[in-house]
Amino acid sequence: MSLPALDDITTHTGTTEPIIMEMMRSVYPHDEVFGEYVTVNDFIDCPPDELFEYLADTRSLEEWTYSLRGFEPTDEPGLWQAYDRLGSETEIYTRTVSNRQARTVDYHCAWDQGKHLWMIYLMRVIDAQVVLDKPGSVVLWTNCHHPFYDHNPYPESAPPERPVWVGDFWDMFGAGHLLEMKNLKAIAEYRVMTTPAVSLIDVSTYLPGDPIGVDYYSHFAGSDDLRDNLMFRAPNFRHHVAEDETATDMIERATAGLIERHGEDVIADVDVLITHVQQPDMPFYGGGGAMAHRLGMRPDYVLDLSNGGCAVFVLGLQVARQMLASGAGRTALIAVVQNAAGQVFDQPGVRRKAQAVVPGDGAAVGLVTLSDESPILDVECRNYGEYAGDMTLAIDGPRKWWQPGQGEASIGFTETKITKVLARGNRQVPEVALAVCDRIGVKSKDLDLLVTNQPNRVFLRNWREALELPKERHVDTFNDCGNLFAAGIPINFDRAISDGTLKTGDVVMMAAFAHAGDFAGAAAIKWGGRG
């Protein structure tokens, strides 16, 4: 079979202009323009990466589309269910497929069912500097006329007596998409004018005392049915808070690095102080007031986040980001303390238990500012209140924690509870991390660094495998520091900065879960470098 004759300058020497003119029209039939393909384009005065991140978040469709409302995640990761008001109470299912490097955002959708997403909306964000020689973005949006627009392939899934099918509106797609493009332009340009960037610009940490080796516990080893459980496989070392060392002392020592690098005034001028202490010095109030006084601060807001647990640094980033972006101030300090290892877990009776060998103490602070130095790209926080009651205290001689008695309090672990916590943690951390990846348009395997809490080696291995990351891109200090609880993420982040693992421009994913799985969170940051 021979190739048909081609129309090119060789075969049409001297006759090019008439051929082209013959193809041109003053008016084009609607079907010729919007028959098989509907394409609309526009310039949007918004940085292309920022516009891409907005579009890559499936929930943005509720803001700029004409008729899609009520987006909720389904049980299937990445698949969202909403309602298309064009079809009255018609359910529409959407999965967003994005590529950050190419800035493509494709919405795979379908009415009535989520198994076959055949309605594909193809979008590309182009840097206007490249194609128009000016800042901003050009958006190209195309929809192809799939055969299913002509007939409903899944009539059994349709609501009864619905009078319309999505394909009935095909002739209006050009005008409708242009209307939605104008909505997108208005929202994106408004966001640029009104939403400032918020950055995590530095962290500083503190580990109390000298490292304590695992042989310390051999002197106290007792009979414990859970000693061989993988949850309690011992790290080589850990640190313990001193007997007379308070949470405020630990934060003051952790903040020293920030003061050295940024000056006392930066700390003194903090507008929002966000704190979390694992073992409060006083049970009736948080440590924020004492910390602010010790550091010479008079913040407008002092917030204590007790429910964040091992994921509280992520929660703190979310709170700081929302508050600073809304005008509550220009600077926030997140201060977290893990001080239970040398107190709760070093009680004479408790330290004989398998659980005592894993925790380690430490403190950290993170400086968050209204700037674009190291922008927080996205944050995902999820609460699972149904699991809150699974974290309990076990006291020899049952009583409430505040009642007098002789028995010591420890965490009420059982084999059944451990199995549940392992299953939840294995699932929750990748889920929140992948949700953030989905919105910022970065595949998990392309993340430059993963930083998590570090309950044990099994979780660390499972999380990086789930996110398809090699060990060298998942920083942890478990062997040196044990389970650092809330301080784990910022201490590991600081370690990655200090040893050169983290480079300027790297995208970092912070992810963790808390307690018995009642909270999980993830945050992505584009690191701008220290100093």
Image (spheres, grey):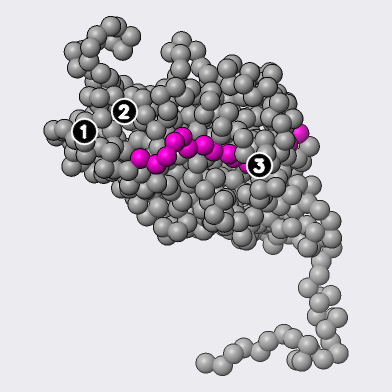
Q: Earlier in the sequence, mark 3 or mark 2?
A: 3
Q: Earlier in the sequence, mark 1 or mark 2?
A: 1
- Looking at the rendered structure, the secondary structure element under dot 2 is loop
Q: Residue at 66%, 41% (x, y): give it.
A: 201
Which amino acid type corresponds to the residue marked 3 in the rendered image? Ile
Which amino acid type corresponds to the residue marked 2 in the rendered image? Phe
Q: Residues within 10 Å of mark 3 (few under 14, many from 20)?
A: many
Q: Residues within 10 Å of mark 2 (few under 14, many from 20)?
A: many
Which amino acid type corresponds to the residue marked 1 in the rendered image? Phe
Whether the residues at callouts 3 and 2 have beta carbons within 8 Å, the answer is no
Q: Residue at 50%, 41% (x, y): give it.
A: 491
- Looking at the rendered structure, the secondary structure element under dot 3 is strand
Of residues 407 and 325, the one drawn nearer to the viewer in this rendering:
407
Q: Is residue 209 magenta?
A: yes
Q: Earlier in the sequence, mark 3 or mark 1?
A: 3
Could you tell me how far apart the alpha carbons at marks 3 and 2 are, in whole angstroms? 34 Å
Q: What x and y, as percent, mark residue 377?
A: 61, 44
Name the residue that disc number 3 marks. Answer: 201
